Image (cartoon, helix red, strand yellow):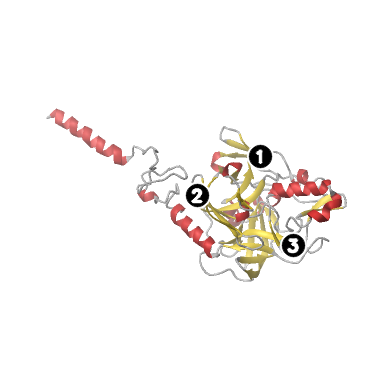
Amino acid sequence: MHKRIPCLSVSALGLALMAIGAGLQSADAGQRPRIIRPPDDRTDYHAASATLRGIGDSVCAFINTDRITDNGDGTFTITPGTLADDFNPLCDGERFADQPTAAFCTATLIAPNILVTAGHCLDDNGVRTAFDTFFCVFDYAVRQADVNPSTFTTDQVYRGAEVLGLVNVADTANDWAVVRLDRAVTGRTPVPVRSSGSVSVGASLVAIGFGAGLPMKFSGNATVQNLVDFGFEADLDIIAGNSGGPIIDATTGMIEGVLSSDLAIDDYHQEGACFKATVCPGDAICAEGFTLLASVMIPEFQSAIQTALGTGGAGDSDGDGVTDANDACPNTPAGATVDADGCETNGGARPCGAFGIIPLMFMMLGLAWMRRE
Ligand SMILES: [Ca+2]
């Protein structure tokens, strides 16, 4: 039995409730995924390869507005809260204890204004997560050893604007979403997505994401174990918060899938007087099985991706469906209805561009010429 990897806030709350009611631990056990298959391959941004860092630059953290403050001056600040705060007391020697835990899900840029993520990151039993409750934040990563990310600027922070496709079927890998952002992201390279064929058993994989809400972690040293309906399974080191993150083929650099879920056991659990990351095999609460990944080759998912790449791809920076070459209004607000020239038809102002200015100039030149005659 697999369990969707839930939002970190839900995970932390569940852990807190478990800590409060320790006698009821067995009733709550099974609500969250397990994580680490030794060795623990989680790597911070600054320690990753240049290739992986390049992909990571196009991976954003979903951060609830209660964990990041819009300072109103073009900057945003992560609000306090570390791993050691979330799992208190954390056992001595646990990794990343003093890093912030702001993120609840992971998403990847596949075109300047298009993300792929997991369906359950935006859908809770049919209830859609409102776009004004979270930000998509790039560079939430430890880019320099021992320097935690804390402040961001407008060019690093985006909002979702439209769900272009979403499926979230419990206990299956059919768990994916394609989302349009409020505006195009500049200076980051969209990550290529598999568009034909199929991932193979044995292929080397890397997961990128914000497990436990922590700054970006890369988890490699894993391979495809099984192909299953709607996706595949792998022995990745992942944790709540990694959900929706890209599963990258380590050889091709392409996205093969997005992280859906893991086995229904706790990612952090109490052992004696303190909390530790669950390591399997080894810890008493372990179960058999692997991480479940939604394949980008699910026909509906692939179709949603291709449609989004066609209308929101590199040639259409405002995502209005009119390519830049033909777009007289290249900065149309998200969601606006546009005409064939890519300009708003619902009252938006058409810019005084070349099409307006040039005839006016000729007319004035003509008048001036006539006066000289
Ligand atoms: Ca491992």
**From what the image shows, is residue 36 above or below residue 349?**
below
Q: Quadrant of the N terminus?
A: bottom right
In contact (CB < 8 Å): disc 2 and disc 1: no
Circle 3 residue: 37
Q: Check disc 3 and give the amino acid type.
A: Arg
- Which percent across, then down, holds residue 234? 67, 65
Query: Looking at the image, which residue is at 40% across and 44% down?
Result: 330
Kindly give the residue lying farthest to the front in the view shown. 126
Quarter assignment of residue 85 = top right
Where's ligand 1: which quadrant?
bottom right
In contact (CB < 8 Å): disc 1 and disc 3: no
- Which percent across, then down, holds residue 131? 57, 44
**Residue toward you, 92 or 121:** 121
- Disc on the earlier residue, 3 or 2: 3
The disc label shown at residue 113, or none? 2
Looking at the image, residue 307 sits to the left or right of residue 75; the answer is: left
**Residue toward you, 7 or 315:** 7
- Which percent across, then down, holds residue 248? 60, 61
Circle 1 residue: 66
Say what secondary structure mark 2 lies in: loop
Q: Check disc 1 and give the amino acid type.
A: Asp
